[in-house]
Image (cartoon, rainbow, N blue to C red):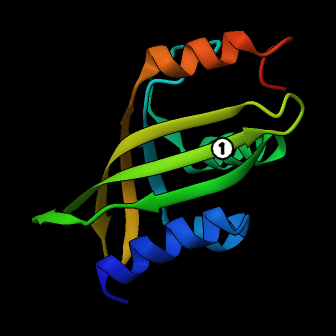
Amino acid sequence: METPELLHNFYRHYRERRLADAIAFLGDDFLFKASLPDDPVDSIRPRSRAEFTLICHKFLDNFDILVFEPGPFSFDGDVASAIARGSFRHKRSGKILDMKFHHWWRLADGKVIELRQEHDSDLLQDFIESLDGGVS
């Protein structure tokens, strides 16, 4: 599978709540790098494939995905990047979170080995704080 098709499939599977299918595109040594405000250890530490899967499960438990689409991909060696637009409804409150994410995907041997994500951390933190009792 070519890289653009693989990445589009990842976004589609995640949007369709087919997490196992999305995670199947990730290599065993996959690392997720993003600033996540609720992390009790370190908000910017790299996370393993297993931790990323748990993060995704928790997110899908708490949010409906209204939109999650990447823009055009650009390529530089083994890295593909795109700006994705996401719109998510918090299930309990009904509040909508609209965000853009800059994603850098590193691939090797037909698998994603790293995803680095940048987003508006202040917007995310403010949204989480606006929820009574937090995300869960």
In which quadrant will I find the N terminus?
bottom left
Look at the numbered disc 1 and give the secondary structure of its residue.
Answer: strand
Number of marks in the image? 1
Measured as percent of width and height from the top left, residue 113 is found at 38, 58
Q: Which residue is mark 1?
A: 88
In this view, 136 is above or below 74: above
Hey, which residue is sitting farthest right in the picture?
92
- Left or right of residue 16: residue 135: right
In this view, 34 is above or below 88: above
Q: Is residue 26 visible?
A: yes
Amino acid type at mark 1: Phe
User: Mark 1 packing: few (<14 Cα in 10 Å), some, or many (20+)?
Assistant: many
Q: Residue at x 85, y 11 (%)?
A: 132
Q: Residue at x 62, y 71 (%)?
A: 13
Q: Residue at x 66, y 50 (%)?
A: 53
Measured as percent of width and height from the top left, residue 18 is found at 72, 69
Q: Quadrant of residue 90?
A: top right
- Left or right of residue 106: residue 1: right
